[in-house]
Amino acid sequence: MTRKILAFIIITLICSFRLTASANYYFLLIEEITYKTDNSTIKFPFFTSAIPEKVEVANQINKRLQHILFYDDEIINKTNIPSVEKYLFIRNDSIDQSGISFLNYTYELYPNFIKIIIDIDWAGGPYPVGAETDYLQFDLERGELILMPDLIDGAKYFDFLEKFWLNDCRNSIKEAHQCAYGNETGNYESDSAYTLEGECEFQCHKMNHQFIITNDSIFISNNSNCFPHVWQNCNFGSSKYLKINEIEDYLSDYGKWLLGLRYSYSDVKPYFHFVGKIDEKYKISLSILKSEEDNVVGEYFYWKQNKKILLKGQIQTGSKQIIMNELVNNAMTGNFELEWDDFLYSTEGFWYNKIKDKKLSVKLMNIYDYRDRGYNR
């Protein structure tokens, strides 16, 4: 029997969290949706709004949350709850269906966002047993899933990673790679065991979506899941708590609003961040900010030099390219011509010098796209 509970949410603000903005969660109503079969028990929240102007915020939270839970765009609520069966683990005399075997949740409310903690188990299929705990944070202005890079000023993102994260993470990835290479070859001390190539080379720049905002800190993590499944015992992972007051200078205006350090709301800025190589050997990091007119500004730097070079250019949607000039002391010294589309897992193209008599290949991996709200476990 489906149990439906509708309740207004009341919560005491956490005093140690430095919040100056008034609470935005007053409008939010939470209904608990439950469903049981012989093999599965699930509970998840469904959101509605007490006021018309916030209906779309509640709808957006439902859309993002249920897509993460069920990998589908259909919205499950009290009127169509039996539809959830197609996502569940069912095993009987006539059906052997892999899917969710257990689903439960808790939540925490803050003035500008809600944190939903999901416990989920799967059964059946090629990997018969699986379990995850997901920490999902949604802002209460747009109802959007919050990603960790949203909180950081795009112009300072790589500075933030370098100061607070990359060294610890790289050490962890290198240890994992040494373990994996040694397990396969029996040689744990060769140069190859310590050399990161391919996807593992840039793994530390790909922040896990499962970051957690606590009372006074942000928990960030990454994993070394860039090896084949047979090496999974080597995926040590890396994680760290960062105090909000120590990273305050690196926060975006959106991050400051979200964490109560700024009163007025500011939207996530349209940044893209990339890491990759020029000429298959020169490692670079690149950030660009897009305007409504498809103009872009940004900068990039070579890892060995760490000197930022200004970029200005334009996205050419017709030819699906982005063309950017690099400038040093206001003089053009070269340009990039790269592929560009709506799905930017990676991009490639060429770098040219000023007179275009030198042409080098460019291959970049996208590590943040402000448009992409997909959630990857």
Image (cartoon, rainbow, N blue to C red):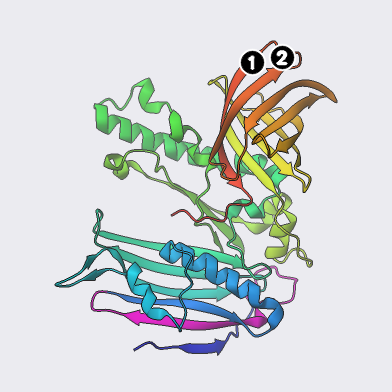
Residues at discs 1 and 2 in contact (Cβ within 8 Å): yes
**Residue 62 point in image, percent of width and height:** 53, 71
Instruction: Specify the quadrant that holds the N terminus.
Output: bottom left
Span of residues in magenta: 14-39
Instruction: Specify the quadrant that holds the C terminus.
Output: bottom left
Element at badge 2?
A: loop
**Residue 333 point in image, percent of width and height:** 77, 19
**Residue 37 on the magenta segment:** yes
Q: Amino acid at mark 2?
A: Lys
Q: Find the residue positioned furthest to the top.
A: 357
Mark 1, Cα crowd under 10 Å, few <14 / some 14-19 / many 20+, is some
Mark 1 lies on residue: 359
Residue 270 in the image: above or below residue 176: below
Q: Can residue 214 be seen?
A: no
Q: Nearer the viewer, residue 365 or 14?
A: 365
Q: Nearer the viewer, residue 342 or 185?
A: 342
